[in-house]
Image: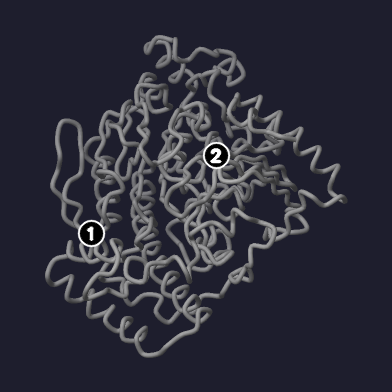
């Protein structure tokens, strides 16, 4: 069955499960493994030329492709995952923000369509959609965010399972157990491996505490950004020097906790075994002594916190990379890499000191852009770097296309399969649309929406104030100079406003359309 024919069958949700299964079998489907992390910056991956070695992750790209212009539709964990699983923007899937939100699991998702087409489906790890998974034969998920150390329970169908261990290792162990013990080799499969790592509070495995302690990470050129001309950037509460909690984030534990975050940090460390706590605190006692050894200026304090942040973050990436290497070892040993697409992605990007920040949320490049790499099996010939604009709403139609399952007409993403087969362009994709809703909330990033082309970016901040920002990404890749009121860019501004409106109409974002004032 040719892909061209499959794409004509628009109403996949209305097709019978038996018909969907027959289509998938006739199409010659691939297995799919998606490994998804949380808050993993492309700046911390060696296959992207980053600041640390990630050999396990790099193996995925070495057998396929690296997307250099991969972005999200809403840079915050739960909503981003909802965009991925539905292939729709937040205003269409209904999950706009983490705070006081609930994902409607009854709606159409790509795992449901795969399952109906005869695929075995499983998900393990951080779900973070505030509802139970649907469309999976098997699932084991963390409650909420999950915890790095000795999570009390893992939720499974009709059960909760007590667990001990480090979250990253647990996710790998349970994923491999499903592949080895529960998977039916006679059926195609989809496995979603969802890591808690590298989410804040960056708690390393005890055995990794000494790693990266001899590393001095380079300070980004924009670390001491003054945010001139960018009110939303100045308003945000995510500066490493000012906003990182000295205990929760930097591990300088307080004997008498002075903040709720400090008290929470102590509780997290207390999840370790008595032996683990002893080893952990012996290591960080040295850090605490170093911190208390001198008075620092505001600038020195920010730089000291930055190095601690980077080292702890790198330790957590190290454990995850090692676990991904274990999964790749198994797939290779069993000969599954010849028939399986393996994707690695993060639910969004992250700031590693750029603009003096940690966290995400903004449409600025470091949090809008996200890593996406794929191992490609036989029959998919693309190799190396793909520069086309892609977005996480494209994952759902891509997986369905790879499985030979019809792509529903109401999915807003595009299948990337043409690019994976070696074609050089993705027809109809000249811009990407973004909308962030969670305000007021942690880190105080204002609500905004915008559009990005290969060169320009236009954003509208609303709710708290009302202002626009325009950037020339070729001339100003760090996005330091807001050109919205620059008369030399008036024609560009008008063209970008036209592009923005076209994308809002395409995706039917009525709220944003009503807020436009150009």
Q: Tell me which numbered mark, 2 or 1, is placed earlier along the sequence.
A: 2
From the top left corner, tell me how far across and down residue 233 is, in percent.
59, 57
* Image quadrant occupied by the C terminus: top right
Q: Mark 1, residues whose alpha carbon is within 10 Å: few (<14), some, or many (≥20)?
A: many
Q: How is the image coloured?
A: one colour
Q: Mark 2, residues whose alpha carbon is within 10 Å: few (<14), some, or many (≥20)?
A: many
- Of residue 253 and residue 125, the one placed in the foreground of this image is 253
From the top left corner, tell me how far across and down residue 196 is, in percent.
34, 51
* 319 up-or-down from 517: above or below: below
Quadrant in the picture for residue 143: top left
Q: Is residue 344 visible?
A: no
The answer to whether residue 283 is left or right of residue 514 is: left
* Secondary structure type for disc 2: loop
- Of residue 341 and residue 121, the one placed in the foreground of this image is 121
- From this viewpoint, which residue is outermost toward the bottom? 293
* Image quadrant occupied by the N terminus: top right
* 247 up-or-down from 324: above or below: below
Tag on residue 493?
none
Which residue is disc 2 drawn over?
Answer: 73
The answer to whether residue 406 is left or right of residue 503 is: left
Disc 2 to disc 1, C-alpha distance: 31 Å
The answer to whether residue 517 is left or right of residue 404 is: right
From the top left corner, tell me how far across and down residue 446 is, in percent.
54, 47
Q: Is residue 317 visible?
A: yes
Which residue is disc 1 drawn over?
Answer: 149
* 112 up-or-down from 161: above or below: above
- Of residue 343 and residue 110, the one placed in the foreground of this image is 110
* 486 up-or-down from 502: above or below: below
């Amino acid at each position: 069955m040719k892909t061209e024919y499959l794409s004509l069958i628009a109403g996949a949700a209305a097709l019978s499960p038996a018909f969907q299964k027959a289509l998938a079998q006739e199409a010659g489907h691939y297995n799919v493994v998606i490994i998804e992390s949380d808050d993993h910056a492309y700046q911390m991956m060696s296959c992207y030329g980053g600041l640390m070695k990630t050999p396990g992750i790099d193996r995925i790209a070495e057998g396929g492709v690296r997307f250099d212009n991969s972005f999200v539709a809403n840079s915050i964990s739960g909503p981003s995952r909802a965009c991925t699983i539905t292939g729709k923007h937040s205003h269409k899937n209904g999950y706009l923000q983490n705070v006081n939100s609930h994902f409607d699991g009854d709606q159409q998702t790509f795992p449901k369509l795969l399952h109906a087409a005869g695929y075995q489906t499983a998900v393990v790890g951080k779900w973070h959609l505030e509802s139970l998974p649907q469309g999976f034969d098997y699932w084991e998920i963390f409650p909420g965010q999950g915890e790095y150390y000795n999570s009390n329970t893992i939720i499974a169908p009709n059960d909760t399972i007590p667990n001990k261990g480090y979250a990253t290792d647990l996710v790998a162990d349970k994923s491999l157990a499903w592949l080895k013990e529960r998977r039916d080799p006679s059926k195609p499969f989809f496995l979603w491996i969802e890591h808690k790592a590298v989410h804040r509070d960056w708690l390393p495995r005890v055995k990794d505490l000494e790693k990266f302690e001899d590393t001095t990470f380079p300070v980004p050129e924009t670390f001491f950004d003054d945010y001139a001309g960018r009110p939303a950037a100045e308003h945000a509460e995510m500066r490493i020097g000012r906003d990182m909690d000295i205990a929760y984030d930097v591990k300088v534990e307080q004997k008498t906790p002075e903040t709720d975050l400090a008290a929470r940090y102590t509780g997290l460390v207390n999840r370790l075994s008595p032996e683990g706590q002893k080893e952990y605190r012996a290591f960080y006692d040295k850090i605490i002594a170093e911190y208390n050894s001198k008075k620092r200026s505001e600038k020195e304090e920010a730089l000291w916190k930055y190095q601690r942040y980077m080292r702890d973050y790198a330790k957590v990436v190290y454990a995850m990379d090692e676990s991904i290497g274990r999964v790749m070892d198994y797939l290779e040993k069993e000969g599954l890499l010849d028939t399986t697409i393996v994707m690695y992605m993060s639910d969004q990007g992250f700031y590693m000191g750029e603009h003096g920040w940690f966290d995400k949320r903004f449409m600025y490049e470091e949090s809008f852009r996200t890593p996406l790499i794929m191992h490609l099996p036989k029959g998919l010939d693309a190799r190396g770097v793909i520069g086309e604009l892609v977005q996480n709403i494209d994952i759902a139609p891509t997986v369905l296309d790879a499985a030979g399952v019809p792509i529903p007409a109401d999915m807003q993403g595009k299948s990337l399969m043409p690019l994976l087969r070696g074609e050089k362009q993705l027809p109809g994709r000249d811009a990407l649309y973004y909308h962030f809703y969670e305000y007021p909330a942690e880190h105080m990033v204002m609500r905004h929406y915008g559009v990005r082309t290969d060169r320009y970016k236009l954003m509208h901040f609303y709710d708290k104030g009302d202002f626009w920002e325009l950037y020339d990404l070729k001339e100003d890749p760090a996005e330091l100079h807001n050109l919205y009121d620059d008369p030399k860019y008036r024609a560009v501004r008008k063209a970008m406003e036209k592009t923005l409106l076209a994308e809002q109409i395409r995706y039917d974002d009525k709220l944003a359309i009503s807020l436009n004032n150009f």
